[in-house]
């Protein structure tokens, strides 16, 4: 890869890691929907997709401007991400928190949403809301996923669950920010190194290489 390809490929990922690191440096956990998590990740790896599969699939000869092909490819990528979100099971992502910290808070929230809430191991059933879920822990990133289980899920039932969980987490403070600092450092490296290499080429050369990459 040349400097421009590296910049296109890794700059979005670097920005994503910096943003994720800033979230992990907050004093409070953050709750995301599963669709928001997937969409942000898809945007982060979008640069890698452009210099990889999209560039490979780009036709060698075109009877019309290349930007129309790029528009079609980007729309296809967006539609695939949207389709994934529509078909995926409902879930909530709690960043900057461990399962041991989240479970007692969820145990307090659940009875307010459904007096008949039932636990079974790491699984929770809120029959009144039509929600059944289990906790999936990812310790390296200090992240917990509340993932739907079973085919009978009420999509609207996840809305009050997310609202109550966000309210309950406002009183929680997180003191361990090491992951956040590490993510920010890695993201800055991914962003600054390609930028420095591209800047060394000069503006006209960067513009020409970008046109060559995008076949414009």
Image: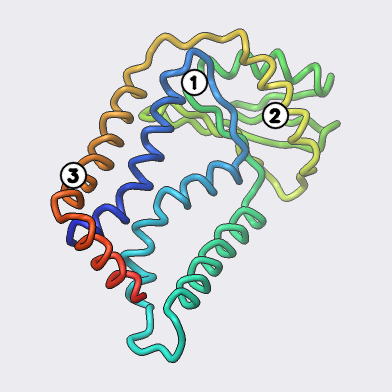
- Position of 160 with respect to 36 (left or right) is right
| Mark 2 surroundings: few (<14), some (14-19) or many (≥20) residues within 10 A | some
Display colour scheme: rainbow
Quarter that holds the N terminus: bottom left
Location of mark 2 (residue)? 162
The single residue placed furthest to the front in the displayed view is 204
Location of mark 1 (residue)? 97
The single residue placed furthest to the left in the displayed view is 200
Name the secondary structure under disc 2. Answer: helix
**CA separation in Å, label 2 and label 3:** 42 Å
- Position of 6 with respect to 174 (left or right) is left
Q: Considering only order in the chain, which callout, 3 or 1, is on the residue closer to the N terminus?
A: 1
Quarter that holds the C terminus: bottom left
Name the secondary structure under disc 1. Answer: loop
Location of mark 3 (residue)? 196
| Mark 1 surroundings: few (<14), some (14-19) or many (≥20) residues within 10 A | many
Residue ID at (55%, 61%)? 78
Residue ID at (59%, 28%)? 31
Q: Considering only order in the chain, which callout, 2 or 1, is on the residue closer to the N terminus?
A: 1
- Position of 131 with respect to 95 (left or right) is right
**CA separation in Å, label 1 and label 3:** 35 Å
């Amino acid at each position: 890869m040349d400097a421009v390809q590296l910049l296109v490929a890794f700059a979005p990922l670097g920005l994503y890691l910096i943003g994720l690191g800033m979230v992990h440096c907050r004093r409070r956990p953050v709750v995301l929907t599963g669709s928001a998590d997937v969409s942000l990740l898809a945007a982060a790896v979008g640069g890698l997709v452009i210099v990889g599969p999209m560039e490979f699939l780009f036709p060698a000869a075109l009877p019309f401007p290349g930007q129309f092909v790029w528009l079609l490819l980007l729309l296809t990528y967006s539609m695939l991400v949207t389709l994934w979100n529509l078909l995926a099971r409902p879930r909530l992502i709690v960043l900057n928190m461990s399962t041991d910290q989240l479970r007692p808070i969820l145990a307090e929230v659940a009875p307010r949403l459904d007096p008949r809430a039932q636990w079974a191991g790491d699984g929770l059933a809120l029959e009144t809301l039509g929600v059944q879920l289990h906790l999936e822990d990812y310790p390296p990133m200090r992240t917990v996923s509340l993932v739907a289980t079973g085919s009978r899920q009420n999509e609207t039932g996840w809305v009050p669950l997310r609202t109550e969980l966000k309210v309950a987490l406002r009183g929680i403070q997180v003191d361990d920010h090491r992951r956040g600092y590490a993510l920010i450092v890695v993201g800055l490296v991914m962003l600054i190194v390609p930028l420095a290499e591209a800047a060394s080429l000069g503006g006209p050369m960067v513009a020409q290489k970008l046109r060559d990459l995008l076949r414009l």
